[in-house]
Image (cartoon, rainbow, N blue to C red):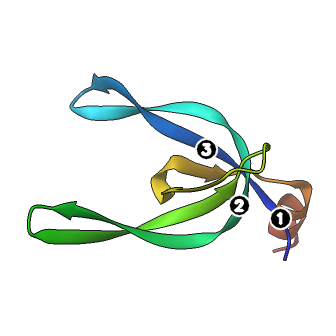
Amino acid sequence: MKKRIVKYYKYTNEIRHSKYVRAFVGEAVFIQFGVDYELNGDTSCMFSTAIIELPDGTVKNIPIELIIFKKDSADENYIKSR
């Protein structure tokens, strides 16, 4: 499986226009998609996540909206061939 590099973010305490602000943290290697959940009172909510490996070897399971896949030359060549 080809390793994909992603840019990953975290939410900050700053709120603009009633939305949390994402702050760039760094780059990581995308491992696979995953699932996590939150408990809200008596109910639970499942959401999609990305499992990533940081440069120091740490593995994190973060919400999917906090990553952006980086384009690489293979991706660009594939798009051009279409």
The residue under label 2 is 30
**Secondary structure category for the residue under label 1:** loop
Q: Residue at x 85, y 54 (%)?
A: 72
Is 24 in front, or is 82?
Answer: 24
**Secondary structure category for the residue under label 3:** strand
Q: Position of residue 41 (x, y in %)?
A: 9, 61
Q: What amino acid is found at the position of numbered circle 2 in the picture?
A: Phe
Q: Residue at x 49, y 59 (%)?
A: 64
Residue closest to the far left: 42
Of mark 2 and mark 3, the one earlier in the sequence is: 3
Q: Write down the quadrant of residue 36 in the picture.
A: bottom left
Disc 1 to disc 2, C-alpha distance: 7 Å
Where 2 sits versus 53, above or below? below
Q: What amino acid is found at the position of numbered circle 1 in the picture?
A: Lys
Q: Quadrant of the N terminus?
A: bottom right
Where 41 sits versus 57, above or below? below
The residue under label 3 is 8
Q: What amino acid is found at the position of numbered circle 3 in the picture?
A: Tyr
The residue under label 1 is 3
Q: Position of residue 66 (x, y in %)?
A: 51, 48
Of mark 1 and mark 3, the one earlier in the sequence is: 1
Disc 1 to disc 3, C-alpha distance: 15 Å
- Asked if residue 34 lies left or right of residue 14, the reply is right
Q: Contact (CB < 8 A) between labels 1 and 2?
A: yes
